[in-house]
Amino acid sequence: MLELHEGGLPVEEILNRWYGIYREKNYGAFINFVGIVRDENEIDGLSFDIYEPILNSWFEAWQEKAKAKGAYLLMAHSKGDVLNHQSSYISAVLSPKRRVALEMIDEFVEDFKASAPIWKYDIIEGKRVYAEDRSTPLSNSGLLGK
């Protein structure tokens, strides 16, 4: 399940909803990761642009990897502005055994940072400034690399 939300994520609502949906589906592990925008470098927050067709393909490929291990992936991400101390990213892995979920959440989050077609901007004095120094170009993306 992939969800996109405008602005900061309602963390408690999302995690509680996911738990409510999947707790009786016989998974033994529900491992989640919540990314929080840090107050650093004099920014007021971050802003995100997403290329949804590539994100959907990337996520589906990961869902197939998870399925091969008896696991299931969940992800929520923000579009637009997210202020400091709000969440912009949540991911979770459900699996019958904890080891699969623990290993997969690490791999998934790292690949997300390197491969997901999401562009990050700093919000400084109300303006979006491309965060080039903290961005990773997408391979084979041509103009979408920035």
Image: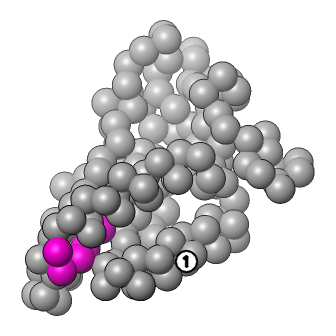
Name the quarter where the N terminus is drawn: bottom left
Q: Quick check: 89 above or below 101?
A: above
In the image, is 114 to the left or to the right of 71?
right
Q: Is residue 90 visible?
A: no
Image point 36% across, 52% down: which residue? 106
Viewer-side residue, 2 vs 13:
2
Q: Secondary structure at mark 1?
A: helix
The image position of residue 143, as x and y in percent, is 88, 48
Viewer-side residue, 66 vs 83:
66
In the image, is 124 to the left or to the right of 45?
right
Q: Which residue bears the numbered disc 1?
A: 60
Stretch of the chain drawn in magenta: 93-97
Viewer-side residue, 125 vs 22:
22
**Quadrant in which residue 117 is drawn:** bottom right
Amino acid type assigned to the residue bearing label 1 in the image: Glu
Image point 49% across, 11% down: which residue? 41
Image point 47% across, 48% down: which residue? 110
